[in-house]
């Protein structure tokens, strides 16, 4: 498969980044746009210098254009309908996160991908960052020994406006999956259980809860502790979060901006001196470009991309378990 024909469904801001990357490639081209709001599609086309047909119905677009792949950049609530319709029509799907908004939806889409044999992959762009790769390498190389605790802090005051201001569980469902997926990717561990306290800070401009504290038990008994808020003004972290991973022989640190490093104790004494170990220099396309490159290349080669929905379900499962735990007030198992 080469020179993929793509329909982009969902002509809001999220699609702009996808469009820029796709337009820079010669192995995939956007041949049509779909949005329930025709004016949004027209504005998107003008903004991105696209001269392609616009449709309000995905089914109609699929029938008319016969694409190879659908790029799903619509709002999360539309994900099940778009991805399911596309795969049933014989198309692969490359999707924004989250790829579903409930366990039931996720299982339905996993089943559709299985019985249609179509690739369903998800944007997890934090896997394609030098810092994330550096942390993963420090851990995989055994520099800090056996991992026992993973900690991430994510604090920003994000004034989006639009649908996010009205979402329930906005931080967990729309943002935390990035950080949870990073934790899985860095550590090589999946989560078994979640315990979450979800709430709103005073002065929050979000209707739903935009702050959360979560503890996951990971495979092998390690703990992953997440602290986050989307309504925290001042002293903000990076979008990639701030990380501390503690192992049996040392600690790996990444502030989300500079290069990661580890500190490993040497000698004896009450508080031991440490030597610093720098992370390796990962080279590769970063962010959306990196993830789209891997997904498109996998499609062309007939392979499953690293961020296929079967794998990504384990990150989405962390999100949905955290939401369920907050609702029930107790530890719950991950169920994807």
Image (cartoon, helix red, strand yellow):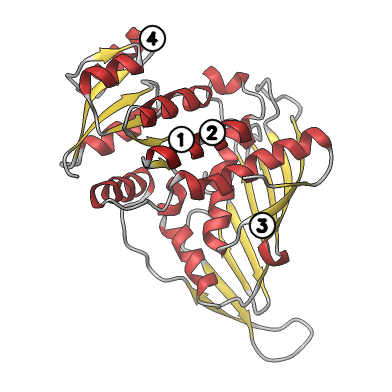
- For the residues labelled 3 and 4, the Cα–Cα distance comes to 42 Å
Q: Position of residue 181 (x, y in %)?
A: 54, 50
Say which mark, if any, is on residue 151: 3
- For the residues labelled 2 and 4, the Cα–Cα distance comes to 27 Å
Position of residue 151 relative to residue 134, above or below, is above
Whichever of labels 3 and 1 marks the residue nearer the N terminus, that label is: 1
Whichever of labels 4 and 1 marks the residue nearer the N terminus, that label is: 4
- Do the residues under discs 2 and 1 have CB atoms within 8 angstroms? yes
Judged from this view, the residue extending furthest toward the right is 329
Q: Kindly identify which residue carries mark 1.
A: 112
Whichever of labels 3 and 4 marks the residue nearer the N terminus, that label is: 4
- Do the residues under discs 2 and 4 have CB atoms within 8 angstroms? no
Secondary structure beneath label 3: strand
Position of residue 217 relative to residue 101, above or below, is below
- For the residues labelled 2 and 3, the Cα–Cα distance comes to 32 Å
Q: Position of residue 34 (x, y in %)?
A: 33, 18
Residue drawn at x 66%, y 83% is: 273
Look at discs 2 and 4 and give the one toward the viewer.
Answer: 2
Whichever of labels 2 and 3 marks the residue nearer the N terminus, that label is: 2
Q: How many numbered discs?
A: 4
Answer with the quarter of the image where residue 15 lies.
Answer: top left
Answer with the quarter of the image where residue 249 lies.
Answer: bottom right
Residue drawn at x 51%, y 72% is: 140
Q: Kindly identify which residue carries mark 4.
A: 37
């Amino acid at each position: 498969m080469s020179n993929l024909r793509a329909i982009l469904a969902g002509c809001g801001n999220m699609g702009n980044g996808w469009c820029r990357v796709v337009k820079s490639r010669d192995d995939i081209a956007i041949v049509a746009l779909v949005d329930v709001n025709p004016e949004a599609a027209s504005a998107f086309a003008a903004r991105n210098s696209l001269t392609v047909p616009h449709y309000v119905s995905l089914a109609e677009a699929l029938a008319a254009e016969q694409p190879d792949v659908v790029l799903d950049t619509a709002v999360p609530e539309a994900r099940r309908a778009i991805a399911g319709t596309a795969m049933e029509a014989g198309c692969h799907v490359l999707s924004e996160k989250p790829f579903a908004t409930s366990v039931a939806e996720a299982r339905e889409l996993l089943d559709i991908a299985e019985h249609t044999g179509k690739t369903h992959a998800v944007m997890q762009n934090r896997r394609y960052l030098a810092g994330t790769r550096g942390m993963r390498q420090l851990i995989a190389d055994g520099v800090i020994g056996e991992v026992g605790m993973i900690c991430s802090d994510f604090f920003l005051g994000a004034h989006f406006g639009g649908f996010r201001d009205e979402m329930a569980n906005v931080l967990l469902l729309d943002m935390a999956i990035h950080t949870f997926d990073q934790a899985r990717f860095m550590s090589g561990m999946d989560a078994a259980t979640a315990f979450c306290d979800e709430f709103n800070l005073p002065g929050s401009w979000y209707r739903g809860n935009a702050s959360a504290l979560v503890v996951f038990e990971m495979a092998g008994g390690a703990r992953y502790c997440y602290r986050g808020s989307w309504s925290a003004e001042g002293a903000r972290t990076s979008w990639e979060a701030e990380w501390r991973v503690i192992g049996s022989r040392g600690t790996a640190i990444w502030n989300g901006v500079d290069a990661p490093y580890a500190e490993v104790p040497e000698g004896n004494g009450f508080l031991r001196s440490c030597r610093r170990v720098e992370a390796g220099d990962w080279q590769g396309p970063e962010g959306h470009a990196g993830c789209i490159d891997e997904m498109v290349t996998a499609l062309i080669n007939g392979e499953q991309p690293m961020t296929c929905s079967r794998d990504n379900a384990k990150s989405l499962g962390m999100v949905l378990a955290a939401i369920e735990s907050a609702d029930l007030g107790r530890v719950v198992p991950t169920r994807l």
